[in-house]
Amino acid sequence: MPIVDVQFRITGKSIPVDHGYALFAGISSLIPELHDHHAVGIHPITGRLAGNRSLTITDRSTLTVRLPAELTAMVLPLAGKTLKIGESSLHVGVPYTRALVPCARARSRLVVIKGFMEPEPFLEAAARQLRELGVNGKPHLTAQSRVAETNIGRTGGTHSHYLRRTIRIHDKEVVGFAVTVSELTAEGSVHLQEKGIGGRRRFGCGVFVPDRR
């Protein structure tokens, strides 16, 4: 079955910048069977950066779940619900479905690969995972100069020219990087969006979208 994105309009005030784990927890509280489907990926919610590590919800913010088309009906009951993300609340609106779009470049705001926390070994591991997927793209780590365009996780580390990020899961901070993959074929780009690389896709990690910047 094809993989699709199910998008919901959302309204609310603000959510934490690092919201991946809390978002999955909030969705799972409304749809418990989501825990049984590891092919599901949840996009990070975008918005406008505010103070105190918060993200202001805008009229372009959406809740987007990537999953096999046959599972679409599982997430439709989110429509009309109030979604708790930590101490924040969002109202979930009407859903619509989008097919994955081929692209020459794809990006993920945060990719985590277990055991790889330094730029050079991480990049090699990302390249290996692409080869294992049969995707002939070239991975790049996002430069620190683009930090103003990002909205998930922290930055820092000794390799300041790369955008190192973390996501908090339970009481542990997991380290990763923002990644772009270039020189993709149409087929390879869709396959990368379907499968992703790294882990923690249900928490927003390794979810790739076309890079139109």
Image (tube, rainbow, N blue to C red):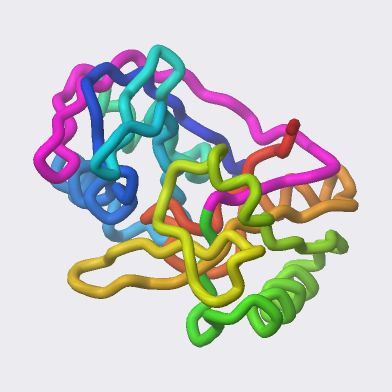
Residue 67's x, y, as percent? 48, 44
Q: Nearer the viewer, residue 15 or 11?
A: 15
Determine the residue positioned at 51% across, 68% down. Answer: 176
- Specify whether residue 92 is painted magenta: yes
Quarter-wise, where is residue 37 in the image?
bottom left
| The one of 74 and 136 positioned closer to us in this rendering | 136
Q: Give coordinates of residue 68: x percent, y percent.
A: 52, 44
Is 31 magenta? The answer is no
Q: Is residue 180 above or below residue 97?
A: below
Relative to residue 168, is residue 114 drawn left or right? right
Camera-nearest residue between 174 and 207: 174
Q: Is residue 117 left or right of residue 119?
A: left
Point 41% across, 27% down: residue: 48
Q: Residue furthest left?
A: 87
Question: Which quadrant of the rendered structure holds the N terminus?
Answer: top right
Which quarter of the picture shows residue 119?
A: bottom right
Residue 126 position by quadrant: bottom right
Looking at the rendering, the stretch of residues picked out in magenta corresponds to 80-109
- What residue is rendered at 34% in x and 14% in y? 94
Q: Is residue 137 left or right of residue 24?
A: right
Residue 193 image point, x, y percent: 65, 48
Residue 114: percent from left, percent from top:
49, 81
